[in-house]
Amino acid sequence: MSKTYYDPADLRKFGDITEWSEELGEKFFDYYGKVFEEGALSAREKSLIALAVSHVVQCPYCIDAYTKDGLERGIEKEEMMEAVHVGAAIKSGATLVHGVQMMNKHKKLSM
Amino acid sequence: MTKKSLSARKNDLSNPQKQLEILSNGIFKDGDLPYFKDKIAETGISPLKPGKLEVLQLNLGYMCNQVCSHCHVDAGPDRKEIMTRETMEQCLEVIRKTSAHTLDLTGGAPEMNPNFRWFVEEASEAGIKDFIVRSNLTIILANKKYHDLPEFFKKYNVHVVSSLPFYKKEKTDKQRGSGVFDKSIKVLQMLNKVGYAQEGTALKLDLVYNPAGAFLPTNQELMEQDFKKALKRDFNIDFNSLFAITNLPISRFLEYLIASENYEDYMYELVNAYNPEAVKSVMCTNTISVSWDGWLYDCDFNQMLELKVASSVKHISEYNEDALQDREIIISQHCYGCTAGAGSSCQGTVA
């Protein structure tokens, strides 16, 4: 057993999850593959969205995967960093917008 | 970025035997990944045999004005291996009678061979259909004696294939050396000016994209669109086609993979991207590669690994196309580089 929770080599074993639940695993990977095909959004745009979300959900496997995916697609590092900031802005905004709840509660409780 | 070849640095990896050991040990010997011969046997190909000969590729020497970090030839200014006029004459004999429709001159920088122009003049008379020179572009600005090469290429209707790893300066210079991008752009403009890739001329100028790092090339058509848009917008440059080429894990790219601890991941990626369709049209099935000293190989990569053709005919001086066509192609794990994704060859994707 690995002594750490995350091992970079585990990323390439992702497909193995199908071994213990074939039907669900296959359905998931079919869906996953379909999601990233060219559609109303380009595969390139989807790659940048995936990179931003990877940071927000703080998935180290996803960050490795979509950094490489971006490099393969010729996405520039400045574009990647801007995408990460979009994720960070939403995440910090999500924290800060709760400040309104704090203000509401504060006002309600105060004379 | 290093300024010397593996050979000049007396690095272990300048020894092809050492490279082949690395490519057969570790993850392959332990059974984590299949050997290439077992993988293609799954596709029903065993052994791999040549199809119709289409391309004769000649390596005019390993000398180059650049020391690119990914170079599979380990070329550089310190390499002295250069094809002699005598070997060139033997090649001309073959060019005059070969059934191949394409002659492909490579290096190093083939233009640095002192007999380059004489050879191009002679070879062009042989009436070969497609006559390619693989130019690194910067050689044309490296010395006054090369400045007129665009005109020379035009005169002999040479099809120019040039490396340009990316349409932006940073990635190009990281891989090929400081200042290479600006010079490459200037030379592409010179080639356009004499008529290359211009409407109304038959002068062909293709570019080669290869990833600047441990990742695979993406869709060749999409990348071509990006290159065309960016080079036109930023530098008013036109070109015909983009060839996306996968970096093979040999020589200086292998050195980089090992030093950056990317070797295993890269090999996994190549194997996972194995495409049975690509293996059916890998370039070794339609190409013969000739080294600077006249030995024959299945491809340029096998040449660098010193894996001579498995045939009774092994040298240009004894060239016999029928005998060569009957050979088995020599393979090892580096071959996964040509079968990944849409496949890879000196002419770009194959599947």
Image (cartoon, coloured by chain):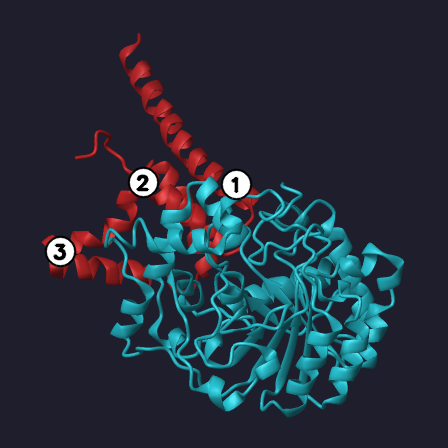
Q: Is residue B220 left or right of residue A37?
A: right
Disc 1 with disc 3 on a shared chain: yes
Which amino acid, mark 2?
Answer: Pro
Disc 1, SS: helix
Camera-nearest residue between A75 and B347: B347
Residue B289 in the image: x percent, y percent? Answer: 56, 74
**In the figure, residue B61 lies in which quadrant?**
bottom right
Camera-nearest residue between A80 and A60: A60
**Chain letter of disc 2?**
A
Q: Is residue B145 left or right of residue A105?
A: right
Sequence-first tag of 2 and 3: 2
Sequence-first tag of 2 and 1: 2
Mark 2 Cα within 10 Å, few/some/many (few <14, many 20+)?
few
User: Chain in red?
Assistant: A
Q: Label 2 belongs to which residue?
A: A8
**In the figure, residue B267 lies in which quadrant?**
bottom left
Sequence-first tag of 1 and 3: 3
Q: Label 3 belongs to which residue?
A: A19
Quadrant placement of the C terminus of chain B: bottom left
Disc 3, SS: helix
Which amino acid, mark 1?
Answer: Glu
Instruction: Say which mark, if any, is on residue B320.
Output: none
Q: Is residue B321 left or right of residue B64?
A: left
Contact, mark 2 vs mark 3 (Cβ under 8 Å): no
Which amino acid, mark 3?
Answer: Glu
Contact, mark 1 vs mark 3 (Cβ under 8 Å): no
